[in-house]
Image (cartoon, grey):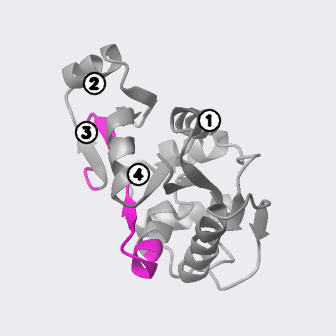
Amino acid sequence: MSTAGVILYGPPAAGKDTVTHALADLSPAYLHYQRIKVGTGRRKGYRFVTATTLDQMRGDGQVIWENRAYGAVYAIDAPSIASALESGIPIVHVGQPGAVTALTHATPGARWVSVDLWCPRETAAERLVGRGSTDIADRLAVWDSTPHLAEATIAIDTATTGPAEAAQIIHEAVQMRSQAPIKRQSCVDGSTSSTYP
């Protein structure tokens, strides 16, 4: 396994979905990796399975990472990650530093670009209201408990960096990753966040 991937890390409403769409606009090679979900709620962007199926996957040693939030269980499994890396450049959304560590350790041949997406809490709250979230208090509680990713390849404040610019920065990092290690880059200037839902 020697292909590239992108890990978009950050708290709720940091812009993971919007940046994913912007990356896909840059190149069809970028593919949103659909994590496993057991539970109710939002369906778009997930692969729903039963609790029994997830138990079987755990027993088979397929689960790389899982976490619980908003009354549901989310998981990343090894077979689907391997397939995604072979098919294109997967974009994986996570919100826990441990998930980044688990994913990179499980795929030692992959060249991951990890991106610490962030925005001010009040910006996140405005975005949650704007997209019609009904569990805003729960999501802001998760926002409060999500630390910055200390070892991220890139740090981007989506309140000051628009989606297209953020995607271009990430795209360039992916291209550079295949040539040589790159230093952490912080982007704090740019367009406003008005294009983030």
- Eye-nearest disc, 1 or 4: 4
Element assignment for label 1: helix
**Residue under label 4:** 85
In percent of the image, x 70 and y 47: which residue is there? 149
Q: Amino acid at mark 2?
A: Leu
Amino acid type of the residue that numbered disc 1 sits on in the rendered structure:
Thr
Nearer to the camera, 103 or 165: 103
Q: In this picture, which residue range is highlighted in magenta?
A: 22-44
**Location of residue 185 in the rendering, given as x and y in whole percent from the top left corner:** 77, 65
Q: Which residue is the site of mark 2?
A: 54
Label 3 Cα crowd, 10 Å radius (few <14 / some 14-19 / many 20+):
few
Say which residue label 1 marks: 101
Mark 3–mark 4 Cα distance, whole angstroms, equals 28 Å
Residue at image position (64%, 43%) is: 146
In the rendered image, residue 101, in percent from the top left (x then y), is placed at 62, 35
Residue situated in front as seen by the camera: 21 or 1: 1
Q: First in sequence, mark 3 or 4: give its number.
A: 3
- Is residue 41 visible in the rendered image? The answer is no
The mark found on residue 40 in the picture is: 3
